[in-house]
Image: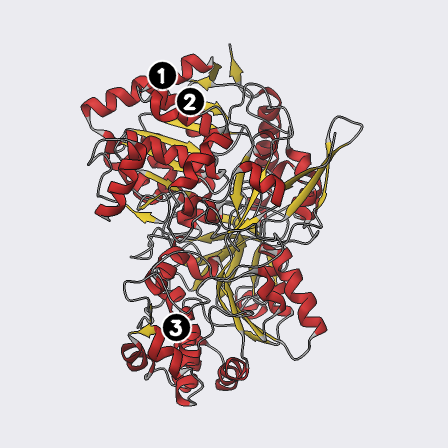
Amino acid sequence: METIKTLCPYCGVGCGLEVVPDKKQSWKVRGDRNHPSSQGMVCIKGATVAESIRSDRLLYPMMRDTLDQPFRRASWDEALNAIVNRIQTIRSTSGPDALCVYGSGQFATEDYYIAQKLMKGCLGTNNFDANSRLCMSSAVSGYVQSFGSDGPPCCYDDLELTDCAFIIGSNTAECHPIVFNRLAKYHKKHPNVKIIVVDPRRTPTAEAADLHLAIKPGTDIDLLNGIAYLLLRRQAIDPEFIQECTANFSAFAEVISSYTPDFVASRCGITVSELETAANYWEQSQRVLSLWSMGINQSSEGTAKVRSLINLHLMTGQIGKPGCGPFSLTGQPNAMGGREAGGLSHLLPGYRFVKNAEHRTQVEEFWGIAPGSISPNPGRTAWDMIVGLETGEVELLWIAATNPVVSMPDLERTKAALLRSPFTIYQEAYYPTETSAYAHILLPATQWSEKTGVMTNSERRVTLCPGFDTPSGEARDDWSIFAEVGRRLGFAEHFAFDSGADVYKEFVQLTRGRPCDVTGLSHEYIRQEGPQQWPCPENEPPHPANEAKRLYTDRRFHTPDARARFSAYHSRGLAEPPDPNYPFVLTTGRVYGHWHTMTRTGRTEKINQLHPDPFLEIHPRDAAKLQIKEGDLLEVRSRRGKAQFPAKVTKAIAPGTLFVPMHWGSLWAEGAEANAMTHAASCPDSKQPELKACAVQLVLVGAETAAEVVAETAAEVGEFNWAKSTLAVTS
């Protein structure tokens, strides 16, 4: 069998992989040297991804009437008929807005698209949201408000063309390692190039920086406005670009006038010298590339932070040119593709919006559905679905390719709401997961290696991922499951697809003339020409796969007057600041090897050996005050929940701040769920929760209690291993 070229199914870097069969009827994976995004590099997650292909797979549909019953094996017909009957009943009694689907950036674009057509088109509700709401929605709203459209304007090639990389809210070295590797190699060869890292933790990313700004959590806008103040005072701006290509500069200038160096340094917990050095690097650089991820997005001020960062690029004219621009690093492998397909509750395919009457009409006409079929009201966000379960307004929740019982904020409240759900469908490749315990129906889905579809990475590069393995058991592609439900509901003419290629062929037509135009792409075209960056309109000459495309090179934006918009925000700080009862700020994040909620990496031996246990980082000064030693078991308590972690005493975390990794759910560790403490306060524009900061207290667990915890953990692991081997199925 020939080598299969595909894409790593983990993070938004979108590394190219080559998969080859070995003699043991399994697969070997290596980096694809010809993929322009990764150039043959691959991290431990991509290198070991084949190990989990057949581990703990959900092999056939399973059902139960109530959550206290065991699952029983069911046929696809029985499961699908039950789903269709329940949807029909709810539509006739409560209306379509009682139906919700919660999807995933793990979807291929084809999966996303068919789900939009089913929910927003045929069923008439915009209640489709994805875990990208927890990940990238602040970047989306920031780009839209500043530029008139979503879409990162930069390319990975800019990593090797910049004079200064400004990394804020991103531990790039661990979370997007191949992006960081490209930047680090370039930085080493060009000592004149500067790297600034803004992070309360001294991460591996910060270790490589020329300047590390260890700001207090929640002071990002203070810092960005402070840099802007200095640049404006020094006239280190591009007045021509501001005059000809932007709007609202005067309001922005008025806001930043109060962000003096002394004020900003005090607010952020840094020195005036450090602030001035950061401004110096911006002033002295002709090409500044800013990189950000969850530390900015997962905030009650997420959109404001994104736009405040974009302000720096607008005032210096640092956009649309090689080596510079505001570059959001996407969290999931196809979060970008989901955005193109309309995969959030306020979006429609082709970068359209449900509130826009013209956009709704365009999609209705293309889908051949009656005028007014698409609701003008944005649907429920991921958290709104949880609230809807609490109030009884949500009567069916369909979860696919994600694990909200670990990833959602305020987990105790989330779990309680899921227990109230009248009917939960869970569509997943793996079993068990933490969420499977809350489902009435389990549907086995194919995963990355078993289905053919496309994914778009952080630099807007579309890669074809061909299926190369036989589906496990009775697993079906996510898009085909949604399509079959649509057919059984009476919409057969809208779901007459024989393959993912057919689905993609229809989807691209909805991007015609839009900022994310991919009408020139098809499965076959990408297979022949290699991964492509959009825009890629029809009839455009073939574009070399290794040649970068940037947005806004003509200095015109997708606003009515073609001008980018300055924003004017004062910092509001954390939604839940520390106080005497809860004196610490808890922040969360990833570690190098694990991915999200460990659904795949938890089943990979090499990664588990690298990261066997969760932990809590605490500064030595705080540890000394509380008489905490390395390895002591600590209980972290917020107003919502608690969890326990062994202490890691380190100067890598700032005093007053704690860090725990967000990966471990109840299947992998006892009582170590980071999101048991977090809250649901969210950005008013993006609706993205502030998962990166909450107020907590620490309690040292006594020796007797610690022994009990160890015993409980051992018992839990034993039960999990039994569940994995039996799948808990009754006949």
From the viewer's side, name the closer residue of 615 and 569: 569
From the viewer's side, name the closer residue of 503 and 599: 503
Judged by depth in the image, the label closer to the viewer, 2 or 3, is: 3
Q: Secondary structure at mark 1?
A: helix
User: At 64% from the left edge and 56% from the top edge, which residue is drawn?
Assistant: 178
Locate residue 356, reporting x and y percent.
24, 49
Question: What is the distance, in whole Å, between disc 2 and disc 3 at their CAs?
Answer: 48 Å
Q: At label 3, which amino acid type do we have?
A: Asn
Image-quadrant location for residue 360: top left
Q: Secondary structure at mark 2?
A: strand
User: Crowding at label 3, few (<14), some or many (≥20) Cα neighbours within 10 Å?
Assistant: many
Image-quadrant location for residue 683: bottom left
User: At 28% from the left edge and 74% from the top edge, which residue is drawn?
Assistant: 248
Locate residue 259, reporting x and y percent.
36, 82
Q: At label 2, which amino acid type do we have?
A: Ile
User: Crowding at label 2, few (<14), some or many (≥20) Cα neighbours within 10 Å?
Assistant: many
Looking at the rendered structure, which numbered label has been put on residue 441? 2
User: Crowding at label 1, few (<14), some or many (≥20) Cα neighbours within 10 Å?
Assistant: few
Looking at marks 2 and 1 on the same chain, the residue that comes earlier in the sequence is marked by 1
Judged by depth in the image, the label closer to the viewer, 2 or 1, is: 1
Judged by depth in the image, the label closer to the viewer, 3 or 1, is: 3
Q: Which residue is mark 1?
A: 82
Would you say the residues marked 2 and 1 are in contact, meaning their CB atoms lie under 8 Å apart? yes
Q: Secondary structure at mark 3?
A: helix
Looking at marks 3 and 1 on the same chain, the residue that comes earlier in the sequence is marked by 1
